[in-house]
Amino acid sequence: MDPPVDGSESSTASPVTEAALVLADPEEDPAYQVFIDSLSYLPPEEVDCVREAYRFSEHAHRGQKRLSGEPYITHPLAVAGAIAEWQMDVEGVVAALLHDVMEDTRVGKSEIAERFGKPVADLVDGLSKLDKIEFQSHEEAQAENFRKMLMAMARDLRVVLIKLADRHHNLQTMAAVRADKRRRIARETLEIYAPIAGRLGLNNMFRELQDLSFKLIYPMRARVLARALKAARGNRRELLSRILDGINGRLQEANVEARVFGREKSLYSIYRKMLDKRLSFSQVLDVYGFRVLVKDVPTAYLALGALHGLYKPVPGKFKDYIAIPKPNGYQSLHTTLIGPHGTPFELQIRTEAMETVAQEGIASHWLYKDSETLGADLQQKTTKWFHSLLDLQGASGNSSEFLEHVKVDLFPHEIYVFTPKGKIIALPRGATAVDLAYAVHTDIGNHCVAAQVNFKPQPLLAELTNGDRVEIVTAADAHPNLAWLSVVRTGRARSKIRHYLKSVQHDESTALGEKMLDQELRALGVAASDLPVSSWKNVLRDSGNKLIKEVYTDIGLGFRLAGVVARRLLAREESSPPIEKQPASLVIRGTEGMAVQFAPCCQPIPGDPIIGSLWKGKGLVIHTHDCPAIRKARSVKPTKWIDVEWEPEPGKLFSVRLLVMVHNTLGALGRIATEISRSGTNIEHVNMEDKHPGMYTTLHFTVQVASRTSLARLMRSLRRIPEVVRITRDQGLTA
């Protein structure tokens, strides 16, 4: 599935014939025999189908080798062997054997469908990359391949299991691959594939992918950490044996039948803990833990009570994942106890069935086909998650954006919050009320204005904690804020906010573009309403747009000049002499939204002489005429600038910065703030700067005013304060 990983040669095999299949005899290959023996759970006729698929794959890949020098067939055989360990059905095993034939050989989907059936062909197609499409960058290609794979996963869960087995074997056999490729593939695995395995409850696969990637990215660190872990294992052997004996003894006293064994944290999880919490290896105390497996849920709680009586539990470290399972179906009781000599250790208590789900996740559905309950709930949750990915895809602009949203969802570290009706919703740690609102419904997210957390009002962007009861307050006229994007933690919330803002910007840009074109046409002596539809034909043909509305949008977003479009509509050449009549200024309001933005450098307010500049993808950016940040740009490209006028808009407030130099006396700040408040002006921000210690202090205010007139009125009232030496409007910061 991954030619750069496998390192297969580029030679292409010929289509498979019946004669060729007869010639390929794999019976003498020990690896093949072990694989066939592992298929004892399948009926004989299905095993024969697998044999045929192997011969088909072997011939298709004949002549191809991996960089290690091995025949290429060793790779699909290893992948199929891993799939057989999960006791997947015959279609899944066959697809694993054939997963590279469409990508690396001349075999097409139709040939696979004819020989092995359409379900197998669909699986192989879902695992094949998009090698016929040209992309601008490797990152873009990877994002699109990932999007295709996830969409295939949403249709059939077997795709993800085959892909993970494929990636696992590739990581195990990368010694011959270039170091930079090894690191790139390992990072991709850590960022995407390992989290997917974790999200699906494939804990064994999750840990192995992490450790293999860690060793490929940081080989020296992995070796040093492995040596330290081995040494610690020897040093603590006596202590661990003592704890194990104590646990077994206490459970026997309580008449609890259980299997108890020690477990060790994976290398990568130890490394992450050291990195995140800035600890040395000796400071990571919970390297070792113990797992207790019991027959049923009541016994699990009984065992917990007995062991809490043996060793003291650490407050705040108990987690009940049986009552509230993780989104990936994981169930267990977790507690941290203080053992002999004050050594803390983690204890996990679960049933045998929970252990199966914990280790094999969604694969337990195939391992225990005869059980109707085991894995069924997990499969339902997994399917729901994949369907949410389809929703994300619909709201994402492109594959790279989609991949970004999915990555957010793959690193949850969940918290659990309650709705007013008692429904439990899992959210990533650090999530806000906005994340919860979008998790409930898109409309609630788009119209949320406040939140009641544990019956107390809280800001929408306040971080939620485990066990919070959250009620979302909505308003019909509310809408998402651009600032939310930097705070929300879920991919769903992020994609829905972006989708809304893009839609709003598009609509606003269309309206702005129509207004700008109308202005240009009036300057040429024509009203836009007088133009016949036929005059738009050439413009639409040249621009590649299908609708007039799309032309307006391009103008509003700065991708097309209104003057050029106007002359084209009137069948005048762009090189024709300029019209003597000067166009009237473009009239704007203070609430044009995202299509018209006010420059942060000069902060224009109504009454200021203003000028606008079109920026591609941004729309119209408004500056004051005397803004120092644009002085050079205006002289270099004068045609880029548009004269703009204000349209009165009562009730709208604008931010403006003020510099107030005062005598450094007691109470000066208080008197100035009181005067600003008395004038009915709101203070957004204030800070102090001591440029002349002992003499003067410069105060930086950001206030909200309605217009230049109200600002002048405020500045006059501040000048009357005796402590004020000088007051100026702060303009001209870098744009």
Image: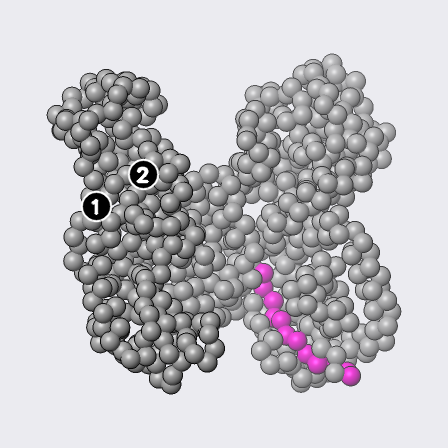
Was residue 338 drawn as part of the magenta stretch in this picture? yes
Instruction: Give coordinates of residue 268: x percent, y percent.
Output: 71, 58
Residue flagged by tag 1: what amino acid is it? Glu
Residue 3 highlighted magenta (yes or no): no
Question: What residue is rendered at 33% in x and 45% in y?
Answer: 621
Q: Hey, what amino acid is under mark 2?
A: Trp
Q: Residue at x 29, y 26 (%)?
A: 564
Pick the quarter of the image with the N terminus: top right
Residue with the mark numbered 2: 641
User: Which coloring applies here?
Assistant: one colour
State whether residue 600 is above or below residue 324: above
Q: Judge left or right: residue 693 versus residue 244.
A: left
Residue 377, horizontal then vertical, whole percent: 52, 55
Q: Residues within 10 Å of mark 2 (few under 14, many from 20)?
A: some
Magenta span of residues: 330-341
**Label 1, label 2: how far apart the Cα atoms are:** 13 Å
Q: From the top left corner, tell me how far across and down residue 60 is, in percent.
A: 71, 22
**Camera-side residue: 444 or 260?**
444
| Residue 151 against residue 523 in the figure, above or below | below
Residue 645, numbered label: 1
Position of 603 with respect to 31 (left or right) is: left
Using the rendered view, name the quadrant where residue 246 is placed: bottom right
Mark 1: few/some/many CA within 10 Å (<14, 14-19, 20+): some
Residue 83 picture quarter = top right
Front-most of 26 and 415?
415
Rendered position, 127 above or below 354: above
